[in-house]
Amino acid sequence: MKGSCLLYLYGSFTEAEEYRDLDIAVYSKAGYDALRLSTDLKIALHEHTGMSPDFFDVRVINGILDHGDLFSLLYLKHIFAKNELLLDKDLDRRTDFIEKYNMKYRDVRLWRRFSKIEKLDPKEKRRIMMLLDTFIEKDRLRERAKTA
């Protein structure tokens, strides 16, 4: 696909016999609009397979590490743990992305805690995420107050 650099297949399609959609993570080449790339890929897959474009859940992962929030971390962990690399047009870009990911989240104790959180009931997970987000937002507000 033009504009795609890396394509990962993940989610229920790779984990279970029954699935409702096809999850694809895309890392695009520099300068490509994420929304347009996602839409173009859905249309291309529809034309190639005859399946509805809505069947394909395409997410562009460029910049996801810049957010650094818990959801981004867990999302990428899931992609890398339960994935199939479908396309790799730029080995250097892929290894740089994975290295950046590993460097950013290399704290083993933190990883163990995230793994435990992943196994919790969705309602409990949501509570923990809200609590963590509260602390993170408090720090952001504190930093803003210092610079103001």
Image: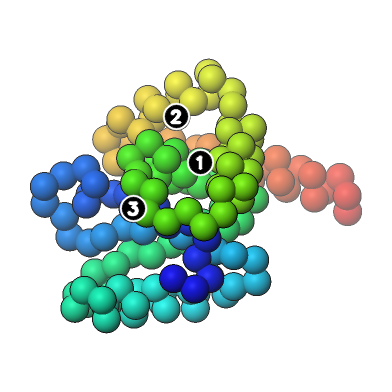
Residue placed furthest toward the left: 17
Q: Are marks 3 and 1 in contact (CB under 8 Å)?
A: no
Q: Are marks 3 and 2 in contact (CB under 8 Å)?
A: no
What residue is rendered at 62% in x and 47% in y? 92
Tag on residue 114? Answer: 2
Q: Can you see residue 74?
A: no
- Measuring from the top left, give residue 111's x and y in whole percent: 49, 25
Estimate how packed mark 1 is, as few (under 14), some (14 to 19) or many (20 or more) residues with alpha carbons within 10 Å.
some
- The residue under label 3 is 9
Q: CA distance from mark 1 to mark 2?
A: 9 Å
Q: Amino acid at mark 3?
A: Leu
Q: Mark 3, mark 2: which one is toward the viewer?
A: 3
Disc on res. 73: 1
Which quadrant, please, contains the N terminus? bottom left
Element under disc 2:
helix
State the residue at coordinates (70%, 40%): 139
Decide which of tag 3 and tag 1 comes sooner along the chain.
Answer: 3
Q: Are marks 1 and 2 in contact (CB under 8 Å)?
A: yes
How packed is label 3: few (under 14 Cα within 10 Å), some, or many (20 or more)?
A: many
* N-term-proximal mark, 1 vs 2: 1
Q: Specify the amino acid type for callout 1.
A: Leu
Query: Which percent across, then down, holds residue 131?
Result: 50, 38
Pick the front one: 51 or 129: 51
